[in-house]
Amino acid sequence: MHAIRWLMICVMAAGLLSGCGKSQKLVDIGNEQQILHIANGDEISDLDPQVTTGMPESRVQAALFEGLVARDPKTLKVVPGVAERWDISEDGTKYRFYIRENAKWSNGDDLTANDFVQSWRRSFLPALGNQYATSLYVVKNGQAFHEGKIGFEDVGVKAFDKKILDVELIAPTPYFLQLLAHHSAFALHIPTIEKFGAIDERGTKWTRPENFVGNGPFIPVEWIPTKYIAVKRNPYYWDAANVKLNEIRFYPIPKYTVEERMFRAGQLHITYYLPRDKLEYYKAKNDGVLRSFQNFATYFYRFNTTIKPLNDLRVRKALAYSVNRHQIVEYVTKFGQKPAYALTAPDPNSYVPEAKMPYDPDLARKLLAEAGFPEGKGFPTLTIAFNTNDEHRNVAMAIQQMWKKELGIEVSLENVEWKVFLDRERQMDYEIDRASWVGDYLDPFTFLEMFTTGNGNNKTGFASTEYDSLIRASALEADPEQRMFYFQKADKILVDEVPILPLYTYHWNRLVSKSVKNWYDNPMDYYSFKQIYLE
Amino acid sequence: MFMFIVRRVLQAIPVLFMVSLVTFIMIRSAPGGPFDEDRAVPPEVIKNLNERYHLDDPLWKQFLDYIANVVQGDLGPSFKYPSHTVNDLIAAGLPATLELSFYALIFALVTGLTAGIIASLKTNSMQDYIPMSAAMVGICMPTFVLGPILLLVFGIWLDWLPVAGWGEIPGDKILPSITLGSVYAAYIARISRGGMLDILSQDYIRTARAKGLSTSRIVFVHALRGGITPVISFLGPAIAGLLAGSFVVESIFQIPGLGRFYVTAAFNRDYTMILGCTIFFAFLIILFNLLADIVLVWLNPKLRQELEARG
């Protein structure tokens, strides 16, 4: 028994007490060896750009792939990617991309125009279930092919020669180049995909680090689920000489408190987000690690316009006009958000909605009385549904109080589990619910398209032929000024018809070590890992 | 003994089947599906995905197909992590979970038994009150409170130990193991104290004392074997609790274990992952309970004789 006791103590010593004293700082070692340690939100579901939809995945894909075009992380303007240049026809419907002569795959294969043709073909194949397939409907006959009505030879994407790609669109689509920077439009190495399964099969092993072939500045070398995914420099990348980092480790850390603690302890260079209660601390500290910037995303409430009394415009207006957004962002959310009075998130460089939903409690009371509910009398108890989250609860409680105080009406709050919430929303089984929208590309179309009649993301019952025709016209219009005019009118219709209640524009706060260089914050949360280095 | 083990293994089969069935019914009754997302997924895409994963088959067929695959050791593909099978993910997360549970168990046994034995030898003294009060605090303090406190003190203020990770930085396994093991150390301290007190009052211990044996010899040679029997009985459920309860510690310390997959699978409606993890944990719990019973029989001659008599 004595021996067993000592054995137990020895096991303890070997296993647990494997090191003590001042802990080693991953960040310091990383700075010396150019290894970036970055928190990446949740665990990535896959690396296949035509299968994934989330932000954590798109960040890793940004390191592993490069589209025909890229974005400048400072300005978000489109810059050459795999294509070194492109021509656009006068009517704006034909694009010719010139792929770099030295563009290669990470196994050394030449990257050709046909790789894009075959990859886009794959993105449309129904069995793959690509959720972004519809975004390439702007390509001529893309939709018809996706729906199985025609063969791929009629789709408007062709390899003119080995390095020249021709794309024909159904209409001038001014945001088309921005779409190409999206992961769903990246080229994939089809022979590698076919080596591990059918071309339209999801979840085969081609994305495993040992099998992976990509065309970006980095290649995956290790993927330990829930621990990290490590990527190293791709020697075949056309601009490998200018890639400075040797390695990036993306850590899936769903808890913001954990990543903040890891940052403080020198285990991370960059956090994904910041715990809300830490913002004041870092602001006061003012040591240059806090990065605070506006997102291209809007937080809003949906009204179910198909049910009483929300089918009455006066009621929706009354509810909307009695919400003080300033109070919400100043005293409730307190994370730098800006009040939103229209749907489209403002982009100071191109588009700021002019229409504004007023804050006017007097008018709100008058409208409610006109609708048959003077001082809120007889108004049914509506329910605000939100998915489980403290912030959503706090915002809902604030609005509940505002409506009680200004309109004299009672609303109840309902906390719903995420998937149940989505299910009910899809079936329009709600009265008022929380919503948000993050733009896919820097163009108002990404927001406004949502409320066209029958759009899967509309979910309010709102339908307006005028609105639909404005959105359609914007898609066909090549003149930027005229497009913005259409968008302003569309935003105004939403403000006037109130199918939604915009509340604020999202704001992002995160911690970035001062040793990280060339990391630029931008509203799309887009990063060019090839430019980043550590000092 | 052999027949005892065979009987227990055979009993496990219907238990595992029922666990699978109940889990299947519960998870499939929950609203929402694995492919529901904030952005509306086009119906044709949902249709294709349902076809791909055979979710359009009748439920009874889906269940029977699933069980047929499980029997062959295939827990199916994960819906949330399409490039991984459930087998892959369990294999990826299991080592960290097992290692964490093992270290926590060692910590719990060493500290718990030491405290329990000392307290039983010095009843109603400070050496009894202090460890037993500490044990009571340990039982009452949940891991999600203890973990952050330990992190704050040893990770941030004193900067002695890493605040997260597993096997990346020396010493990063210490705090999670202590956090997870504390509550079990506290239970073991109290159980072993009771067990030892019971044994120490037996006639054969009094005889040993009368013969002039040293306290350490009495404790370690004569009393401990009988005194820790209740602890052994406790170890089966304790190990199961350690494995299943590691999720909280895994999330506090960013440990790449199995618990995180298990919990997030429920939120993601990752049907196969939930079923796979449930069946796997049920299997582990049955296994460890069986092992604890075998050890108990091995330690206790009375039980051994009883089993032999029963055949």
Image (tube, coloured by chain):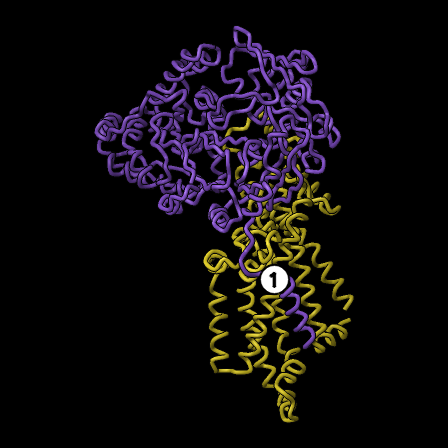
Chain colours: A purple, B yellow
Vertically, is A11 above or below A448? below
Check the picture and name the quadrant holding the C terminus of chain B.
bottom right
- Quadrant into which the N terminus of chain B falls: bottom right
| Residue A528 can be seen in this image | yes
Q: Relative to residue A374, is residue A155 drawn left or right?
A: right
Q: Quadrant of residue A432?
A: top left
Which quarter of the picture shows residue B192?
bottom right
Q: Is residue A407 left or right of residue A91?
A: left
| Residue at 46%, 20% in the rendered image | A445
* Residue at the spot 66% in from the left edge and 26% down from the top edge: A188
A505 or B283: nearer the eye?
A505
Residue positioned 51% across, 14% down in the render: A173
Q: Amino acid at mark 1?
A: Leu
Q: Position of residue B231 (x, y in %)?
A: 61, 71
Q: Would you say B125 lies left or right of B33 here?
A: left
Spot the residue most to the top: A90
Give the image location of residue A63, x and y in percent. 59, 32
Between A247 and B299, the residue placed more toward the observer is: A247
The vertical placement of A469 against A344, above or below, is above
